[in-house]
Image (spheres, rainbow, N blue to C red):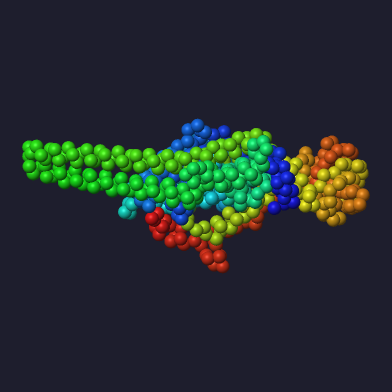
Amino acid sequence: MSLLSTLARLEAIRSGHAEPLATVRHRHLSDSPMVLIPLATAAEDGAPLAVLLGTDRAEPRLHFVPQPLNRDGRAEFLAALADELLPYLESYAGTVELIEGSEKDPATGEKTPVTRELCADAPQLIVPNAGSVRHLALLGRATRFRRTAEEPDPGPYPAPARVPLLGRWLTHLTERAQVPGASLLLPMTGLLARHWATGQSLLEDQQLAAQLAWHSPPPGTTGAEQAELAETARDGRGQLLHPPAGPATDPRFDEKLLAPAITRHDAALAALRQARGRQAAAGAAAEDVAGDVAGGTVLGGEGARVREAEAAVRESVAELRRLLLGVLLPTWEDVWRGLDLLRGLPPGGHVGERWEGDRWSYTGHRDRLAAGEPPQPRVDDAVTAARKLAQREREQVRVEVQEALDDPLAMAERRLSGEAFSAVVVEVVPEYDTSGRSPKPRPLLVLRTADQPHADPGREVHRASAPTAQKAEVVAFDPAAGLVTLRVLTGMGRRKEPEPGSLPEPGQTVVFTLFELTPRQSAPLPEPADTPWTHGGPPSAARSSTSGVEEWA
């Protein structure tokens, strides 16, 4: 936690409400995001219980498993979820932009022009917290390898064709969520924590209702008091007024309400099976005694019992629906309330650039599915794992730099740590480098700053928000007088004199950073087939295939 974040949390404790950590919004928000709130079975994080989802705040849709231990019930739940979610995920695949580019011919090494498709937009899923992201990742792992009835060997429990497709999409979205700055799948608690500081710990911020309680406490109360109420307040039945935001449920809800309701549903199903069995037996007996009035009376009585049992099953399902909606709807409203708060911030200048990276990621996965490539492997090979790690490290640096350039509060954190400084130009001294054939402009900038940067002589600095990338070198730094002298090295054009406007004017406020504004590319990695033996060698067909996959029990 940075010094500024710590100070903001202390200020939130003093003021009693959340304090801003950003002046702009650092993540993209879609015009129609899919809000998705999953619930898992108690003690079985990978076993789904229910999902509330939708793109319309006024029309949430609930899918649930009446008996989470029933394999057929889970299969029906996943099929219904796939039918609901896949049309949204696939709806962005048809509208594309044509992007001109070039690629190197592997045979000749020459660059050839190519035209690539880029989806004009991409889907976005909003979940309550990081636990929901992990739950979706487990669902993706459990479903992307499921055999279907269309395969030559469907196995004993074939799934609808769209279920493994849903698993592949969930795996892609949850893996993309691990990339810093990505916005295809976002946890609301993380979004709010990036933009506001509360007076509680990051772990406590994972309770969405408690985190939101700091944003608008009623007059005469504090965020801490409202957060405690959100976490502990219960109704007359002993149930939380603000249940956990998922995927875990409140143990008291499980014990007092959910478990008895599931038991009643199981009993109703058992009674229905018995009634249908008796009806079938009575029908067989009636066929043996044709025209028997008593046999018809028996059949009529058994039919009435079947209808009563069917009504009891419908009532038990309706009871479960009411219970689960009561648990999920408060979180549904909290997620949309968080979206309202975030939409009140203007987007940062580099948010669109990072969203374009998400669009490329979405387009690439769309193309892999269209090409018939196999599902993502259970375990990445050494080269793929190294590439993912290098990408995440590079994107972490990129997003930190871009947020600092977009947001004065983010840059203030860098200034407090000595990694950047804001200064007023005192003087611009023309100087030249005459060591070459022709003199090159190397002017000196004399700056006055109140910051305390780690500006050792000879250290490289970079000018933020310059017309072009501009690099300078520290010549001298006098902390007592607050004077920094820099020698500008680049970003002045190719002429003998600096281009007009390339250098700041005296009296102008400038910001220089001691970190590079463009992250460096990592070293190239070999192809997976060329993986050295020190890292396990090339990935074998057994490890890459789906023949030995785990079945979803």
Q: State left or right for residue 509 relative to residue 352.
A: right
Residue 419 coordinates in the image, percent (x, y): 78, 51
Residue 264 coordinates in the image, percent (x, y): 34, 47
Q: Residue furthest bottom?
A: 534
* Rendered image quadrant of residue 466: top right
Residue 463 coordinates in the image, percent (x, y): 79, 45
124 and 384: which is toward the camera: 124
Q: State left or right for residue 536 relative to residue 151.
A: right
Residue 22 coordinates in the image, percent (x, y): 70, 41
420 and 459: which is toward the camera: 420
The answer, for residue 208, to whether it is visible in the render is no
488 and 162: which is toward the camera: 162
Residue that appears at 53% across and 47% down: 244
In which quadrant of the rendered image does the C terminus lie?
bottom left
Residue that appears at 40% across and 50% down: 259
Rendered position, 336 above or below 475? above
192 and 30: which is toward the camera: 192
Q: State left or right for residue 33 relative to residue 224.
A: left
Q: State left or right for residue 153 relative to residue 388.
A: left
Residue that appears at 42% across and 52% down: 145
Rendered position, 220 above or below 151? above
Residue that appears at 56% across and 39% down: 334
Q: Residue furthest top?
A: 58
Q: How many marks?
A: 0
The answer, for residue 268, to whether it is visible in the render is yes
